[in-house]
Amino acid sequence: MLMRIQVRNLAIVTNLECDFQPGMTVLSGETGAGKSILIDALGLVLGDRADNAMIQTEAARAEISALFDLERCPQAHHWLESNSLDEGDECILRRVLVRDGNSRAFINGSPVPARSLHELGQLLVDVHGQHAHQSLLRRNQQRELLDAYAGNRKLCEQTARLHREWQQAAQRLEEIRNGAQERLERVDLLQYQIEELTRLELAEGELQALEQALRRLANAGELQRQCTLILTSLYDDEDSVQSTLSMCNSELQDILNLEPSLSDCQEMLESAEIQIGESVMALRQYTETLELNPQQLEQVEQRLGVIHDLARKYRCRPEQLGARLTELEQELEQLNNTDIQLAEQEQRTFALEQEYRAQANRLSKKRQQAATRLSREVSTGIHTLGMPNGSVATRLEPLEDGSTSANGLERVEFLVSANPGQPLRPLAKVASGGELSRISLAIQVATINCGRVPTLIFDEVDVGIGGGIAEIVGRLLRRLGKERQTLCVTHLPQVAAQGHHHLVISKESDGERVETGIRQLDERQRVQEIARMLGGVKITPSTLNHAREMLELSKGPTSQPVRE
């Protein structure tokens, strides 16, 4: 809901501030007082195209800001959160026009492109007027309004979800089909690689055994020399370790006769002598196995070379070649199952399409039923608004070539015939601005509980009407105001008397400059203003009584409290 607007240095407005309330607010004033300037200012802060010529002559810049309450506008909350501009239940829009530069736009203090103001503005305010852009002229909005009227929200969400899932499945199916040649080439490559790694026949632990054998064969001569040297020191020399241990053990045996406590030492020497003997035996056996075998060395080197070459080829460590073979075999198995995948994907895609079409057909049927009701209700509405021969129809037009969309199988368009004998034409092509405004009003009233935009503005919706029809227009606007904030610029007292609140825009001059101001009227002032609107050079007691009567009638027994 619009809570406040402030305008500075725009056209004939130097500094204007105005607070707004829930319900229907009337804006009136003498012709040329500046009512259109206020609407234009609101349009600028909502993202309309800026014109620097609107800046006051003596000013370098003009500025418009508007404060909105978002408590009943979840779609605006969502938009702000999605754009990281959310600051709670209030939102400030600001537009600055610079004489020697481009205009600037701000949302909650953050600079944004003007198109962002426009996107958010469409969620906050809907302007209906002879020349104002209206959301109702957009076919998408007409479809959304019909669906809201029909109670199709869940059905629309399900249809959109199924269409999305169907399209994703169809895309995956196309990818599988288009990948057939690449798949065959990949299968050939995998088969070759698997055959190559299978021929390697790399056994568990073979790599470690080959590396050990390579070290032994490559150093066989040095190993023989070192083993011989050790054997000589341990056993073969006259002063070998074995001989020395044997002598020491014999001497210690003699000492034991004198000192039995050395028996433990004697046991350890015997044990050492035994271990030296076993070590000598093991070294002799190992030395016997050592031989210089260039042919075997070459075979080991070749085998290791093949293993390392394949590891480099398949970009893994030699010990990972077995795991790489398993991976390739698994991939080949998956590719060989592609025919099964293709069949399954075809079945899934077909099932989703059938489910979507069934849901979309249910949506089309509900839309058609609602379109008949809505057309009848809006036609009745415009008959009471000075268009007795007018008619409104809601057309459901199938998409071209049997195509589909997330929104269903058809387009929705509001058609209007304003006069007898005239064919039904799209709402956007209705020639008369006044007729368009009244048709929009009738549609808004018929769908009063369906709209999501919290603030409606009707700019001179009463052009070309008067008398009883004007009073009906006023009552309809008042009825709208009980559900959503409604601002109405009017010249007719019958409309003005129906407002919950009344603002007057006036123009004053000091002989040098003209300024526009705005003020809230109390009950006494409202009587005076409505009497002025009733006309006449002189406001008589009779005129004032008439004005009071109109205000009293607007608060009759059918009046209901405004929704805060």
Image (spheres, helix red, strand yellow):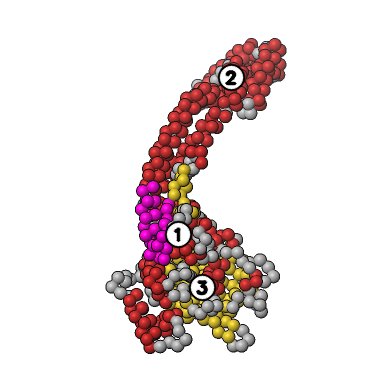
Element class at badge 1: loop
Left or right, residue 349 beside residue 302: left
Who comes first in sequence, dot 1 or dot 3? 3
Region of the chain picked out in magenta, as a range = 368-394
Please tell me the numbered disc located at residue 519.
Answer: none
Looking at the picture, how far across and down is residue 395, in whole percent?
44, 49
Q: Residue at x 52, y 61 (%)?
A: 431
Residue assigned mark 2: 191
Could you tell me the amino acid type at mark 2? Gln
Up/down of 180 relative to 366, above or below: above
Q: Is residue 216 above or below residue 484?
A: above
Three-letter residue code for mark 1: Asn
Q: Is residue 78 visible?
A: no
Q: Residue at x 68, y 68 (%)?
A: 101
**Mark 1 vs mark 3, CA separation in Å:** 40 Å
Above or below: residue 471 compared with residue 318: below
* For the residues bearing labels 3 and 2, Cβ distance under 8 angstroms: no
